[in-house]
Structure formats: C-alpha cells, structure tokens
Image (tube, rainbow, N blue to C red):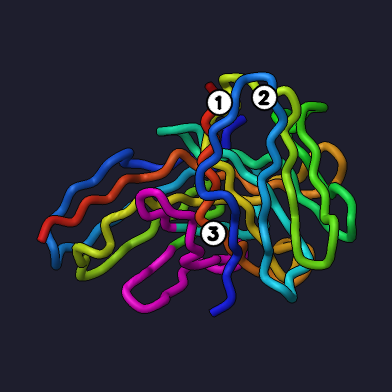
Amino acid sequence: EPEVTQTPSHQVTQMGQEVILRCVPISNHLYFYWYRQILGQKVEFLVSFYNNEISEKSEIFDDQFSVERPDGSNFTLKIRSTKLEDSAMYFCASSEALGWQLSNQPQHFGDGTRLSIL
Amino acid sequence: SQQGEEDPQALSIQEGENATMNCSYKTSINNLQWYRQNSGRGLVHLILIRSNEREKHSGRLRVTLDTSKKSSSLLITASRAADTASYFCATDALGDTGGFKTIFGAGTRLFVKA
C-alpha cells in the first residue's frame, strides 16, 4: 500500500537555525498537510496546500513557517529562526480530495519528524 | 472553541473486552473521523462517518454519531493487545480564508492487557 514518507525521522537543530522537513506524499494525492504534535499534547493543524498554494493555515503558521512543493513529489516545511518551543513531532499528510467538498477522503499520515531545538 | 474532545483520557481493559471512547464537538460538521496512533508513529485513519449517518461499522469498529448532541462514540469489540494505542476523533472546520482545517481532539489512550 502506498504511504507518505518523511525525512529525517529525527532532526536536532540549534535555536535560531533554519530547518527543512521533507515529505513525499502519496503520488496521486492532490492535497497536502502539515501538523504538529508537542509531546503529550494533541495534534495541531498547521497548513493545507493544494494546486501549489496554501489552502488554509492556522494561527500557529506565522511568518516563521513556509511550505513548498519544489518538484512533482516532495512537499517541504521550512521553519526559519527556530525557537525552543518549536520542538515537536511534525506530521505530513496527504489526501485525494478535500473531504467535505468532494468525496470525504481520509488523510494519510507519515510517521513524522521529531524536531528537537537545543 | 475547541473541537473534538474525547473521553475518557485513558482506558485500561482486559483483552477480549469492549472499549468505548467518546468524542464531543462544538460546531457543525460535515463528517467526523477517527484515527489511531501507535506510540512514535503517525496517525492511521480508521473510519469516517458523514453528518447524515448515525452508525457505521468496519470490522470490530462501530462508530455512532449524534449530531443533536454533537457527539460520537467509537466502540472496539473483542479488544486485542494490538489495539493498544491512542485514538483521536477529528472534524473539519472552516478556516479564516475559506479553506478547511482538521481539528483533532486530545485523544483517548487505550491500553489492552493480555
């Protein structure tokens, strides 16, 4: 079964540095998402992406964050000038269609990147 | 306001018993989904129930939805040790720019003892 893959599995970065988290969504999927899960807390929506532009973003997704689909397969999340509170698991997901607009397709998640800011 | 709050926060049962987890939400929904997360892994989609459905089954899973009470329940029958995981409900909320965002609850941690 096709799956969403994320790299690296663990990223350790000094505070203030930039990080790029990478994701390869399922190949025929059209919608892509990033989520964050701080240890012991709920999964939080960051951003959704469709047709090479942001579809929706949360209050968390401020100017520090950006997303890009640099080629036909990768979907990246860039965090500039990282802060201690950016330490979390970051999950990428993809789906065939926007659930409530079309056919209610589920989101498929990768296993996440654990980001540790020192 | 928060969407998708589950209870209980944690549940410990014996293998073979049934496990019931509940989810409440605050705004109107188009559908509600349940996901499972094994420790250190990503979320796995279990089942989706549309707002015009009241009950749905998938294998040992049974989901109910009561839109009048803004609540849903996930029942796992004949539980197995492998069902040990966190379970989350999720709803879609309209975002500020017209797109949607998926809101997850805090989850129920299920532990099934062999």
Question: Is B101 in front, or is B22?
Answer: B101
| Residue A106 percent across, percent down from the top left | 61, 66
In this rendering, position of residue A26 left or right of residue A57:
left
Q: Nearer the viewer, mark 2 or mark 3?
A: 2
Res. B28 visible in picture: no
Local SS, label 3: strand
- Residue at (72%, 73%) from the top-left corner? A27
Stretch in magenta: B36-63
Which chain does the residue under circle 3 lie in? B
Q: Which residue is mark 2?
A: A82
Who's the residue at 57% across and 21% down the image? A85
Q: Above or below — where is A56 with respect to B37?
A: above
The reply to whether residue B5 is in sight is yes
Cα–Cα span, label 1 and label 3: 32 Å
Q: Amino acid at mark 3?
A: Gln
The residue indicated by pointer 1 is A117
Quadrant in the picture for residue B94:
top right
